[in-house]
Amino acid sequence: MDPQFAIGVERNDGTSVVRLSGEIDLNAVPALHEHLDPLNGNVVVDLGGVTFLDSSGIGALVRTRIRIEAVGGTVVLRDPQPIVQRTLEIVGLDDWVADGTGSGPDGDAIGMQAT
């Protein structure tokens, strides 16, 4: 795992908030799966501290969203830095980014207060 990568999970009123920082690359994906796989319901992935996101990290996020949405949950991304936002735009996942008000990309509430 990249020494700069860090992950934390908090649960707030039925929503899991996953805070990521550092580089999310092939080396970080096993730890990412370890923390994301047990989650269900509404999940917010805070990308504010992420400085790099490669295809393996994107794959982990896609896999998580497919799994959680299959059982009625939601996964949204929050607060990506410009370089990560651009990566999400290039791969067509920018519509997964919440608008910063506590609403999902389509305006639905995601069960947490905006921070």
Image (cartoon, grey):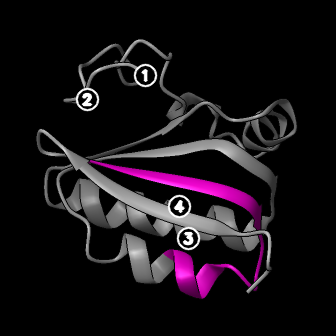
- Looking at this view, is 115 or 65 the one in front? 115
Above-or-below relation of 95 to 62? above
Residue occupying image coordinates x 48% and y 25%:
98
Mark 2 burial class by Cα count in 10 Å: few <14, some 14-19, many 20+ = many
Mark 4 burial class by Cα count in 10 Å: few <14, some 14-19, many 20+ = many
Q: Position of residue 84 (x, y in %)?
A: 79, 42
Above-or-below relation of 41 to 85? below
Determine the secondary structure under disc 4. Answer: helix
Rounded to the nearest whole Å, what is the CA distance between mark 1 and mark 3? Answer: 25 Å
Query: Does the residue at mark 2 contact the one at mark 1 (Cβ under 8 Å)?
Result: no
Mark 3 burial class by Cα count in 10 Å: few <14, some 14-19, many 20+ = some
Query: Does the residue at mark 1 contact the one at mark 3 (Cβ under 8 Å)?
Result: no
Rounded to the nearest whole Å, what is the CA distance between mark 4 and mark 2? Answer: 17 Å
Residue designated by label 4: 61
Mark 4 or mark 2: whose residue is earlier in sequence: 4
Residue extent of the magenta highlight = 16-32
Residue designated by label 3: 60
The amino acid type of the residue labelled 1 equals Thr
Quadrant position of the N terminus in the picture: bottom right
Tell me where residue 97 sits by quadrant: top right
Give yes or no for residue 21 being in the magenta stretch: yes
The amino acid type of the residue labelled 2 equals Ile
Residue occupying image coordinates x 20% and y 49%:
73
Q: Position of residue 6 (x, y in %)?
A: 63, 67
Mark 1 or mark 3: whose residue is earlier in sequence: 3
Query: Does the residue at mark 4 contact the one at mark 3 (Cβ under 8 Å)?
Result: yes
